[in-house]
Image (cartoon, helix red, strand yellow):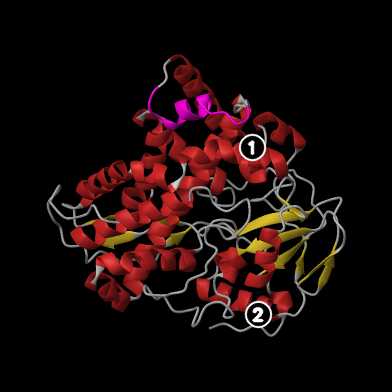
């Protein structure tokens, strides 16, 4: 494993350097940062035409991230969460605030409205659809004996589930897929050319998804159906309903964060089963017992969302954190990817262990009001797809290096070639248990 004699060698803003290096190198770098008694400080990166801000502190220890996550009154989300730089006010005004970038009562109001669709009871109601979609995805590849696990398996499941929930017609699925790739691949030249303005690409992709949401909402207002859009249009809390911009912003959040994170957890899970074949054997020995802990370990190991940002509120008193005194306007980046390897919380954190318990990872975000609303749905999707994979194509293995997304925000895989023993579509298997 790489070691670091000089912390100055670590540049968390270097997309082409640091974030393109092997994961072992990055883990070693975060180990070094975690060992520092005081929070390390970094300048802000360039992002399109946005002006550079004052810089940020990198949080890599679990204790520091838990403190910030729980203190939503002083560490606010309203200045931005998935971006280091502050977005232009006109962009925020155009699409309205997303739930993930709201604070206080407004965030609570919106979350109460939309959370009705994401309770465990509600998610169990879509269990049959998740199972049928997963079975159909395996049917599409099982006779071939090889495929790209990302485009043919991982990306399809969460995209189809969320689009089905929202009532997005199948003819628009590919359109949604392309726009979300743009939103979460702004640093990757396969999605956004280096000469393009990243802010402009973000604006256009967001606008395209918002336009689709407005079109679907208008149709559902006149023709209600059994889908999430119809539910959200009629839902209210204390007489308040979602505004059109809030509905559009929620849709953008759901189809981007809700598809990319699960997609990458599935992809990394398939990679891990190839890298650690003994763990595949353990999992196959008792699917019912091992699946719950195995999917949690995949999320810990993969940490699909690498970081989230918080900003110290303007009216906050000085805050002691990680050996630093933080004041109003100071930015912190919570590196979930690093905290999920914190040896204070995980024994042998570098080991992939499908039986790991306890497993207090924060792959769905830290505790507090912004804990991932779709965590239960993501867990459900992971359990179902891996039961399908391990039951119907149990020898699936990776045959080439993962083509990783160039990003400091998303631990993504763009392509993952796999092979397996061909089988028959729609083979009857006992796959209903999760």
- Percent x, y for residue 138? 23, 50
Residue 320: quadrant of the picture: bottom right
The reply to whether the C-beta atoms of the residues labelled 1 and 2 are less than 8 Å apart is: no
Q: For the point 23% across and 52% down, which residue is it?
A: 432
| Image quarter (top left, top right, bottom left or bottom right) of the C terminus | bottom left
Q: Quadrant of residue 402?
A: bottom left
The residue at 62%/28% (across/down) is 245
Dot in front, 1 or 2: 1
Residue 337 location (% of width, % of height) = 56, 66
Q: Earlier in the sequence, mark 1 or mark 2?
A: 2
Give the distance between the C-alpha atoms of the residues marked 1 and 2, in whole angstroms. Answer: 41 Å
Residue toward you, 340 or 58: 340
- Tell me the SS state at disc 1: helix
* 254 to the left or right of 79: left
Q: Residue at the location (51% across, 63% down)?
A: 303
Q: Is residue 352 magenta?
A: no
- Where residue 14 is drawn, which disc sits there? none
Q: As drawn, which residue projects farthest toward the front? A: 238
Image disc number at residue 109: 1
Q: How many marks?
A: 2
Residue 375 pos. (x, y %): 48, 53
Residue at image mark 2: 32
SS for dot 2 = helix
Q: Dot 2, how many residues are within 10 Å of its Cα: few (below 14), some (14-19), or many (20+)?
A: some
Hey, which quadrant is residue 336 in on the image? bottom right
Bounds of the magenta span? 225-238
Structural crowding at the residue carrying mark 1, measured as other residues with C-alpha within 10 Å and reported as few (<14), some (14–19) or many (≥20): some
Q: Nearer the viewer, residue 67 or 157?
A: 67
Q: Is residue 248 above or below residue 344?
A: above
């Amino acid at each position: 494993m790489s070691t670091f004699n000089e912390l100055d060698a670590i540049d968390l803003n270097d997309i082409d350097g640091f974030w393109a290096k092997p994961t072992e190198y990055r883990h070693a770098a975060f180990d070094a940062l975690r060992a520092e008694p005081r929070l390390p400080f970094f300048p802000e990166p360039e992002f399109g035409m946005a002006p550079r801000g004052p810089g940020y502190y990198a949080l890599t220890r679990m204790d520091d991230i838990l403190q910030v996550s729980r203190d939503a009154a002083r560490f606010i989300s309203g200045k931005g969460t998935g971006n280091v730089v502050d977005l232009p006010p006109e962009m925020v005004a155009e699409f309205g605030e997303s739930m993930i970038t709201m604070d206080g009562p407004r965030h609570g109001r919106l979350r109460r409205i939309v959370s009705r669709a994401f309770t465990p009871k509600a998610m169990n109601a879509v269990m049959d659809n998740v199972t049928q979609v997963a079975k159909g995805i395996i049917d599409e590849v099982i006779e071939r004996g090889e495929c790209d696990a990302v485009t043919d398996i991982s990306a399809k499941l969460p995209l189809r589930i969320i689009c089905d929930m929202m009532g997005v017609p199948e003819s628009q699925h590919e359109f949604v897929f392309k726009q979300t790739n743009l939103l979460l691949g702004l640093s990757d030249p396969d999605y956004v050319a280096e000469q393009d303005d990243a802010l402009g690409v973000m604006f256009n992709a967001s606008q395209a998804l918002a336009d689709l949401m407005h079109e679907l909402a208008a149709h559902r207002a006149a023709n209600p159906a059994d889908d999430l859009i119809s539910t959200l249009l009629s839902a209210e809390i204390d007489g308040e309903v979602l505004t059109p911009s809030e509905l559009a912003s929620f849709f953008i959040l759901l189809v981007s964060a809700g598809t990319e994170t699960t997609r990458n957890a599935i992809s990394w899970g398939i990679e891990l089963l190839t890298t650690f074949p003994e763990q595949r054997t353990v999992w196959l020995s008792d699917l019912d017992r091992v699946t719950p802990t195995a999917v949690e370990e995949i999320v810990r190991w993969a940490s699909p969302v690498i970081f989230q940002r918080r900003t110290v509120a303007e009216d906050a008193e000085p805050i002691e954190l990680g050996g630093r005194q933080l004041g109003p306007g100071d930015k912190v980046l919570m590196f979930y990817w690093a905290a999920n390897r914190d040896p204070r919380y995980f024994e042998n954190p570098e080991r992939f262990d499908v039986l790991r318990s306890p497993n207090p990872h924060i792959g769905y975000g830290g505790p507090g009001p912004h804990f991932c609303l779709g965590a239960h749905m993501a867990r459900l999707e992971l359990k179902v797809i891996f039961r399908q994979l391990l039951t119907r194509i149990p020898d699936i293995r990776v045959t080439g290096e993962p083509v990783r997304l160039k990003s400091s925000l998303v631990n993504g895989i763009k392509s993952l070639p796999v092979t397996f023993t061909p089988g028959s579509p729609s083979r009857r298997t006992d796959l209903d248990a999760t």
